[in-house]
Image (tube, helix red, strand yellow):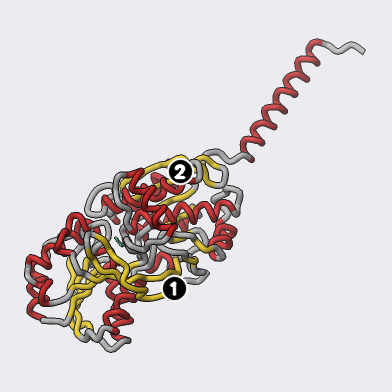
Amino acid sequence: MTISLTTLARRGAQVLALTALASSMAAAQTPGKLKVGLMLPYTGTFASLGTAIENGFRQHVTELGGKIAGREVEYFKVDDESDPSKATDNVNKLIKRDQVDVLIGTVHSGVAMAMAKAAKESGTLLIVPNAGADAVTGAMCAKNIFRSSFSNWQPGYAMGEVMAKKGIKKVVTITWKYAAGDESVRGFKESFEKGGGTVVKELSLPFPNVEFQGLLTEIAAAKPDAVFTFFAGGGAVKFVKDYAAAGLKKSIPLYGSGFLTDGTLDAQGADADGLFTALHYADSLDTKRDNAFRLTYAKTYKLQPDVYAVQGYDAAQMLAVGLNATKGDASKAAEISAALVKATIDSPRGPFTISKAHNPVQDFYLRQVGAKENKKVSIASAKLEDPARGCKL
Ligand code: BEZ
């Protein structure tokens, strides 16, 4: 049998085409790098919080050898400036332009709600490493949306229980007028009033305003037994200093959700000494797990870790649990959810589980500031679960 040169050339071309097809199918089956989109504040009053979250996240990825579920991690970053008006455009840079597999963000509740909406519509996996907006794991909850931090309701509720048990009766609240402030106060009021206390006045100012003088004068005039507050980052530093400078620290005890004194103590100095707050982390837990985490963090970043660093670290832990269950496929939200709701996360804060609505079920500590640390006093509320109002999952 003789085969013509033309036939030979055609067969050669067919073999080449088949080889190319086989290798492109293999490439499609082998997931490439895991694209992680970090949407965090790197400027403004929450800048140091965003950096701590990124540091914590990277710390765990480094512990995993730079890979999650076998996929090398590649980072894409957007500074969200804690500005809700820019949030939809910012998150779409990560979803549409960079086509990330997972979004990690953010700090500010208003920005997080825009991220949750975009994640829900696009199906992109989202892990919120701070923002407490109740709706994220409440009315907006979804199979592909998770939180490694807290709901705003949780620390407020824990502090309300503590203050009612102390026999405090009349409280003035003061906070920023946005979801985190409003919801922290609502959580506080729920348990405080259940325990027999009354909120006599609710004061607020727009985020990120720090002109507190007029409101401090109103607090002095109201003469409450105590004040409950939510402020964080640069605003918390200024509030604690202004409260002391106004002479109120001596006469009207100041309590807060723990963001008031987390990551802020160097700047607040003696003005923060003695303050009581409630949070899901403390500087003095003295567990093997937390000590190891703190040592590595301090060595790597030449900084002491805070609650934000822990939440970033745990976002990476949660991502690893979820993706290990899907062999690295971030689009399989139902399988990721199933793995996470039955997991226990071995966090530096202490072990926690994840509710059906995808929010941590965790202990809240009563802490007191001393020697530049948030020292654990007791457990204010054990295994506290957010009520997840409006969540249908
Ligand atoms: C928030 O906006 O949800 C938030 C910001 C800083 C600390 C805690 C909560």
> Which comes before the other along the chain, label 2 or label 1?
2
**Residue 113, visible in the rendered structure:** yes
Q: Amino acid at mark 1?
A: Lys
Which residue was labeled with disc 1? 383
Instruction: Tell whether 21 sits left or right of 128.
Output: right
Q: Residue at x 20, y 69 (%)?
A: 274
Figure check: 30 above or below 355? above
* Secondary structure of residue under mark 2: helix
Q: Nearer the viewer, residue 227 or 178?
A: 227
Image quarter hosting the N terminus: top right
Instruction: Tell whether 102 sits left or right of 215.
Output: right
Q: CA distance from mark 2 to mark 1?
A: 30 Å
Q: Residue at x 38, y 76 (%)?
A: 381
Figure label count: 2
Can you give x and y, in whole percent of width and height, for residue 125 in the image?
A: 49, 54
**Residue 122, visible in the rendered structure:** no
